[in-house]
Amino acid sequence: MKTNLTLAMVALLAGAPAALAQSATPADIPAVGQTKIDTETFSRSVPSANRFEIESSKLAEQKNVAADVKDFASLMVRDHTKAGEDFKAALEQSQITASVTASGPALLPKDQAMLDQLKNLDGDEFQAKFILLQTEAHKQALALFSTYAQSGEDPALKEFAKKTLPTLRMHEERLKDLVAAHS
């Protein structure tokens, strides 16, 4: 069983770059190497990404996965719930005049697609896909937040991005530990 899980993780991780390269990135999702992100894109992306983290992690808490994966999922729910509250506070201080809300609309298509991939899985399959998708989601979040923290237009949202980055980096490190432990 452990060998099968190892092989599954290796296959998933090996195929991830090719699969991700084939999927077209929607125009409203910033590319990892992008040097500037406008406030509208940032303020639309954050609630959806945050909601994906919470909803996918709540699924993980209910599934048959390893204890360290459940612990990580609980951390995601807690930290991203706080991030949502912090984003709402930043929005209240921001200069945005559009009708952006902290909860945002339904999940953006890319986040909904990732969540849908998890819904019918369980056990080792769920665990491997959850770790893979969390890794990709945090890579995108780090790109989004670090870019906006450096070049963002709105001071309150820029400060929110700066304050959130250390937590996202810590999540990325925890994910590396999970990959090492389960591959």
Image (cartoon, grey):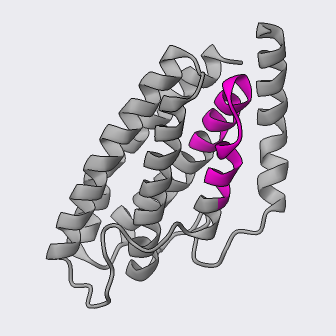
Which span of residues is magenta-colored? 113-134
- Secondary structure mostly seen in magenta is helix
* Placement of 91 over or under 59, stated as above or below: below
Q: On the image, which quarter does residue 42 sit in?
A: bottom left
- One can see residue 170 in this view: no
- What residue is drawn where x is 48% and y is 24%? 70
* Placement of 89 over or under 43, stated as above or below: above
Q: In this view, does 97 lie to the left or right of 62?
A: left
- What residue is drawn where x is 23% and y is 73%? 91
Residue found at the very far left of the displayed protein: 93
Q: Which of 71 and 120 is in front in this view?
A: 120
Q: In this view, does 132 lie to the left or right of 63?
A: right
Q: Is residue 159 left or right of residue 45?
A: left
Residue found at the very far top of the displayed protein: 2
Residue 52 falls inside the magenta stretch: no
- Tell me where residue 130 appears, x and y as whole percent: 62, 36
- What residue is drawn where x is 44% and y is 35%? 171
Q: Nearer the viewer, residue 137 or 154?
A: 137
- What residue is drawn where x is 44% and y is 56%? 51
* Placement of 158 over or under 65, stated as above or below: below
Quarter holding the N terminus is top right
- Tell me where residue 147 appears, x and y as whole percent: 44, 63
Q: Nearer the viewer, residue 116 or 145?
A: 116
Quarter holding the C terminus is top right
* Placement of 80 over or under 66, stated as above or below: below
Q: On the image, which quarter does residue 126 sit in?
A: top right
- Tell me where residue 48 appears, x and y as whole percent: 47, 64
- One can see residue 125 in this view: yes
Q: Is residue 34 left or right of residue 169?
A: right
Q: On the image, which quarter does residue 43 sit in?
A: bottom left
- Tell me where residue 45 appears, x and y as whole percent: 47, 68
Q: Nearer the viewer, residue 54 or 138?
A: 54
